[in-house]
Image (spheres, rainbow, N blue to C red):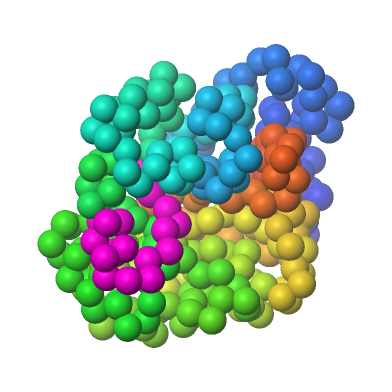
């Protein structure tokens, strides 16, 4: 029977995870990892910007370089909403120098129509076609109108049992299923699990409206569950990867690492290595 332990052994946690397991943390800091994401898979591995909430852009990109990840969901603490065209151009140039692409913006809380307007204007100026957002229920129709006007997709983020608006993917889907097809879901698989849901089953059930996802594992399928390294939680990651292939998911799987946030590199590296090892081991 394939177990998480077997996958760890097969993959050696990727090059990064192996280095960490051997205690070679200083070596990880000294050299970037040169390893390509499995070419046979249509989905991309990225990192959600919130993972770097305590770090400036250069520090964040250095960590991405060390774990060889090339897609970033942009947060406003790295690129403020009021950024000028010159500042946005400089931001993208900085990302390019690290071989990183900013593919989306958010999550952005949008409590009024004015904030929705500003969010879409921001995404257009940044040059992305995807917003990760949290609007009020009464403004969902307005969000749908803006997706048509801008031809920018809008993915609503679920935040677990504490979130009165969008605790899980099922709630989001029921609210958006009759709206324009450019309104969808940013599937936070960890928070979905904390709300008592089966994240593998929900990935399949709502796949047509899942535009983005926050890749994470959690310690328990309860409100008290917390983010942990990807291979150490209660979500069956090998089953999740197999489902990604089954539904032919082509978007980003952006690791959102919310543990040890003042020193996240080791956990990010272990999670990235584990995910890549699972991708290799399940092929």
Asked if residue 274 lies left or right of residue 97, the reply is right
Q: Residue 211's quadrant in the figure?
A: bottom left
Q: Which residues are magenta?
A: 103-120
**Would you say 146 lies left or right of 220 here?**
left
Q: Residue at x 40, y 39 (%)?
A: 79
Residue at the farthest left position: 149
Percent position (x, y) of residue 194? 67, 73
Residue nearest the viewer, comparing 219 with 54:
54
Q: Quadrant of residue 117?
A: bottom left
Residue drawn at x 58%, y 27% is: 59
Residue 160 visible somewhere in the drawing? yes
Q: Residue furthest right?
A: 23
Question: How many labels, in total?
Answer: 0
Q: Residue 142: x percent and y percent? A: 22, 74
Q: Quadrant of the N terminus?
A: bottom right
Residue found at x 57% / y 64%: 189
Q: Is residue 220 magenta?
A: no
Residue 196 placement (x, y as % from top left)? 66, 80
């Amino acid at each position: 029977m394939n177990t998480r332990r077997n996958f760890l052994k097969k993959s050696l946690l990727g090059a990064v995870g192996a280095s960490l397991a051997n205690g070679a943390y200083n070596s990880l800091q000294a050299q970037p990892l040169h390893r390509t994401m499995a070419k046979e898979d249509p989905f991309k591995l990225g990192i959600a910007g919130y993972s770097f909430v305590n770090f400036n852009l250069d520090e964040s990109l250095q960590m991405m370089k060390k774990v060889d990840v090339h897609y970033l969901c942009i947060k406003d603490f790295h690129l403020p909403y009021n950024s000028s065209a010159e500042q946005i151009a400089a931001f993208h140039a900085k990302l390019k120098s690290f071989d990183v692409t900013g593919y989306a913006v958010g999550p952005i809380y949008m409590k009024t129509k004015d904030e929705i307007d500003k969010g879409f204007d921001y995404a257009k100026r940044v040059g992305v076609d995807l917003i990760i957002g949290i609007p009020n229920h009464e403004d969902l129709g307005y969000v749908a109108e803006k997706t048509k006007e801008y031809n920018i997709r809008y993915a609503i983020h679920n935040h677990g049992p504490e979130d009165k608006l969008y605790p899980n993917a099922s709630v989001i889907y029921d609210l958006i299923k009759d709206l324009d097809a450019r309104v969808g879901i940013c599937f936070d698989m960890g928070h979905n699990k904390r709300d008592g849901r089966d994240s593998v089953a929900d990935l399949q059930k709502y796949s047509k409206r899942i535009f983005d996802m926050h890749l994470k594992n959690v310690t328990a399928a309860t409100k008290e569950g917390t983010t942990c390294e990807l291979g150490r939680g209660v979500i069956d990651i090998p089953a999740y990867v197999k489902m990604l292939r089954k539904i032919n998911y082509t978007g980003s799987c952006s690791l959102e690492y919310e543990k040890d946030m003042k020193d996240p590199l080791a956990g990010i590296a272990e999670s990235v290595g584990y995910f890549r090892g699972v991708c290799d081991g399940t092929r």
